[in-house]
Image (cartoon, rainbow, N blue to C red):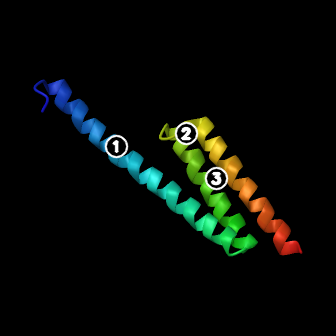
Amino acid sequence: MPQRKTALKSLRAAKKRRARNLFVKKKIKDAIKSFLKAVKNQDSEKAKQQLKIVYKELDKAAAKGVVHKNKAARKKSRLTKKLTPAKKTQKQ
């Protein structure tokens, strides 16, 4: 345990930040899971809606500094690639 007042305050702040960051990351993971489930079921309309939600969550997290902006961009790009084949299979 920290001895100094500032170290105690820093510890409290770190705990709050960690809890908030874990919550945000959990929201992102849940959104991605629901998107991938929609893609797997070849439900392109639901997948599009879920992709919008994923984009929103990733952008928010990147803005808050929970995830790096390049990581958010990379995830968005890779998830969009997964949506494209789902569209092609549904057209055929």
**Residue 7: quadrant of the picture:** top left
Residue drawn at x 55%, y 61% is 31
Give the farthest residue toward the right: 92
Residue in the picture at 21% in, 32% down: 9
Alpha-carbon span between mark 1 and mark 2: 16 Å
Circle on res. 65:
none
Residue corresponding to mark 3: 55
- Which numbered dot is residue 63? 2
Instruction: Nearest to the eye among marks 1 and 2: give it.
Output: 1
Instruction: Decide: is 25 above or below 47.
Output: above
Mark 1 and mark 3 lie on one chain; the one further toward the N terminus is 1
Which residue is disc 1 drawn over? Answer: 18
Amino acid type of the residue tagged 2 in the rendering: Ala
State the separation of the CA atoms marked 3 and 2: 12 Å
Sequence-earlier tag: 3 or 2: 3
Q: Check disc 3: other Cα within 10 Å, few if <14, some if 14-19, many if 20+.
A: many
Badge 2 crowding class, 10 Å Cα cut-off, few under 14, some 14 to 19, many 20 or more, is: few
Asked if residue 48 lies left or right of residue 1, the reply is right
Residue 89: x and y in percent read: 83, 71
Say which of marks 3 and 2 sits in front.
3
Q: Hey, which residue is sitting farthest left in the picture?
A: 3
Q: Give the residue at x 65% y 42%.
A: 73
Percent across and percent down for residue 61 are 52, 45
